[in-house]
Image (cartoon, coloured by chain):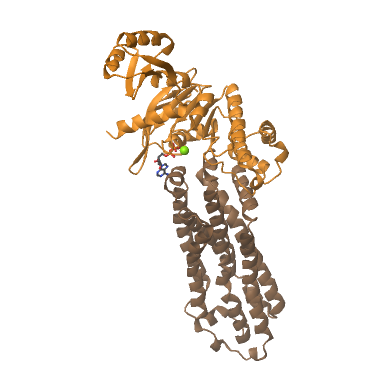
Chain colours: A brown, B orange
Amino acid sequence: MDRIKAIIVKEWREVFKNKFIFFTVSFLPLMITALPLGILYFATGSENFGGVTTADLPPQFSTLCGELSGGDCMLYYIVTQFLLLFMMVPVIIPMTIASYSIVGEKTTRTLEPLLVTPVSTLEILIGKGLAGIIPAVSATWIGYLLYAAGAHIMVDNPAVVGKLFDPLWMTAIFVVGPLLSIFGVSIAVMISSRVNDPRIAEQISGIFVLPIVGLFIGQTMGLILVNQQFILWMAGILVVLDSVLFYFAVQIFQRETILSRWK
Amino acid sequence: MMNNGPIIQTTNLSRSFGDILAVDRISVSINPGEVFGLLGPNGAGKTTTVRMLAALLEPTSGEAYVAGFQIGKEDQKIRRQIGYLPEAPGLYDALTAEQNLAFFGAMYGVEEISRQIKRYLEMLGLWNRRYEPVATFSKGMRQKLAIARALLHEPEVLFLDEPTSGLDPQAARLVRKFIAELSGEGRTIILCTHNLDEADRLCDRVAVVNGHLLALDSPKILRRKIFGRKVVFHLLEAKIDFEQVLLAFDFVSEVHLVENKILVSVEDPENNNPALIRALIEAGAEIQFVGELRRRLEDVYLELMKSAEGINNG
Ligand SMILES: Nc1ncnc2c1ncn2[C@@H]1O[C@H](COP(=O)(O)OP(=O)(O)O)[C@@H](O)[C@H]1O
Ligand SMILES: [Mg+2]
């Protein structure tokens, strides 16, 4: 435990000195929170909004609205559109932190003195992982709370705001979010072992954010319905994916592998 | 821990990387308290050897015991017993000197970490700079901090991989002095170097390596026994028959004729020379000068490497 704590503190001391990382960790969630709030602001302010009926919405979505009226259902639709966008925060932040931290240790050759200590591979990975996951998950949760607060202020019908606290959102924010951050860290570990420039590591890792962007676009186009079932599937797939990826990350982080096979 | 036995023992320790045989069947025994040199040019396998002994790399074949524990089987126990200075100091630039040491202290689970940090930072003259980020440190200061890091947990065995390479002469001298002090405390030190002079000054015994073990002895004996000493005779005219005359002596191992000079390898010039001079005069030589060919240690070493290459290449 002491070792893991020491690793986390060390990572933060190092990584947050980097302005780019600081920017990513603070501004990305802010932007992703501000954007839907802005749209919500304009949506609630527009005049002819009351005339909307459920018929204007993607047909599958109206089933999610339950008792909500046409206009409120529209608002809920808008609010929920951004759930997947929120899910980018817990992937991108730990990816950035882990890429910089691992590639950084490689270029400054600080891994060897670390590996010669009795620290275990698992401790290193958990420490480095948590150093990325803790800020990522905190940023997601804070962003979500700000979003919910903003929606509460702007939307009159408490039933719409209440939807932000239904099991769909809860599972997404508190289960899928952390799972995505583990995914982000594992991907970053694998890529960092192959490249020597943190920016390249980050860019390659970025490819793995694309599926989420794809889902977001699919959802906007009405191809995908983000409902409880969808989120549970996402969580299930991520559990499997995370286990496999973390297993490989542990293999890649063996002393022997780092010193003989890393590029 | 084995009593009285060697603290490090390797048997045919080997490591290859793909087709490259980096370390080839090295067998050595290192005694507790010894300063043991691994001397060889770049690419001789020194780093690979100490990495195996420090439980960082697995041997391809052969085995080794460090502080009584077998590498590959009891690595965690070995890691607690050894200190290791890698080729590159590898410090966290954004962290202060103290934070760097505190971090590694936590990795080793050092109790009384503040006391240990103070002890070694004072000893190495870095105590006043403890709150400064390592990014501001000179090469020599970094190296000293990296040595402090290797000592925090009071290891029995200390591996130093090229501790003075890249340092200016003054910093190198300070580091050497500190190594000498450490060995005075009874620690076992394994010192990798390509600097013969450094090996000569610091080590009790030196293993000359180039992939495999070429020679192993105290620096003094190595120089004398393996390399011999050379006497040069300047003659008015050097004749080919003189070679046979000199080779007839047991203590002469080699004779070379170069222009009007004869180079003779002998074991003990002070005692052997009178007989050689007498024999040459009897054979009709007219001797102008006699002297010892002062070879720099570096030359001796290069020669050894060259002859080893000859053996390797068939
Ligand atoms: N990780 C590695 N991958 C491939 N080859 C390596 C690796 N490490 C060392 N070598 C090779 O092994 C040989 C010995 O290297 P090294 O142990 O670093 O020698 P030294 O420390 O004596 O300079 C060299 O030919 C080197 O290129
Ligand atoms: Mg080396």
Q: Nearer the viewer, residue B160 or A50?
A: B160
Which image quadrant is residue A173 in? bottom right
Q: Nearer the viewer, residue B150 or A169?
A: B150
Instruction: Judge left or right: residue B132 versus residue A260.
Output: right
Residue B66 appears in the figure: no
Residue A131: image x %, image y %?
60, 53
Residue B294: image x %, image y %?
45, 22
Which image quadrant is residue B113 in? top right
Residue A71: image x %, image y %?
62, 86
Total numbered labels placed on residues in the image: 0
Q: Say which residue appears at 58% left-offset and 29% top-offset.
A: B176
Q: Is residue A176 above or below residue A7?
A: below
Residue A38 appears in the figure: yes
Q: Is residue A243 above or below residue B308?
A: below
Quadrant in the picture for the C terminus of chain B: top left
Q: Nearer the viewer, residue B98 or B271?
A: B271
Which image quadrant is residue B232 in? top left
Residue A224: image x %, image y %?
48, 76
